[in-house]
Image: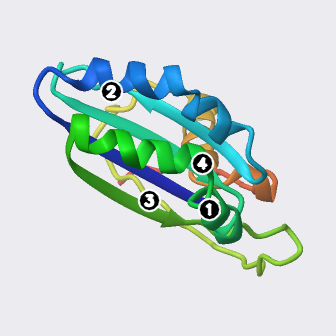
Amino acid sequence: MIILNVTYKCIPGMREEFLEAILREGIDEASRAEAGNLKYDYYIPLDGGDDLLLVEKWRDGTDLKAHAETPHYAKLKELKPVYVTETVVERYEITEHTKEEKPMEEQIITITVKTQGDSCELSDAEIKDWYMNKITALFDPRWGAPEITVDVKRRPL
């Protein structure tokens, strides 16, 4: 998958007109309808600046290359000199693995907490639940729930 974050630095005061022109020409809808397009959305920053952000997701490079050959892409290129001073493109390529492709490994993590006196007001069960939730959140759910064992032992120092 390819993700593009395209920031259009618009001429001051022209951002809304640029977005209106994009929508009027149907550039957004035509791009979303293309084969391999997973996302094509425009965003306006909260700070009120003149930037316009486009986030695109494409299945692969072939689909993205075909997008660059479309009439609506050409129309966007025609609009840019009227409204935009600079275009900044960030490109990310993500390779997804299936569960079968991902090598499995065992990770043993030991956590020791030493305190003075009765400084922990949680019960052993509450401590166990807290650690289980925090550790589980670290793992990608696509690979299934990790097998986690948390033992709470108290002993005098």
Cα–Cα gap, marks 3 and 4: 62 Å
Of marks 3 and 4, which one's residue comes earlier in the chain?
A: 4
Name the residue located 40 percent from the left edge and 28 percent from the top edge: 43
The reply to whether callout 3 and callout 4 are in contact (CB within 8 Å) is no
Cα–Cα gap, marks 4 and 2: 18 Å
Task: Classify mark 3: residues with Cα within 10 Å, few (<14), some (14-19) or many (20+).
Answer: few
Q: Mark 3 points at which residue?
A: 112
Of marks 1 and 4, which one's residue comes earlier in the chain?
A: 1
Q: Name the residue under label 2.
A: 18
Can residue 120 be spotted in the picture?
yes
Q: Image quarter for residue 97?
A: bottom right
Q: Tell me: 61 left or right of 44.
A: right
Name the residue located 50 percent from the left edge and 22 percent from the top edge: 23
Of marks 4 and 2, which one's residue comes earlier in the chain?
A: 2
Q: Mark 4 points at which residue?
A: 71
Name the residue located 37 percent from the left edge and 59 percent from the top edge: 90
Q: Tell me: 155 left or right of 104.
A: left
Given residues 150 and 102, the one toward you in this image is 102
Q: Which of pointers 3 and 2 indicates the residue nearer the eye?
A: 2
Q: 84 above or below 98?
A: above
Locate the N terminus by quadrant: bottom right
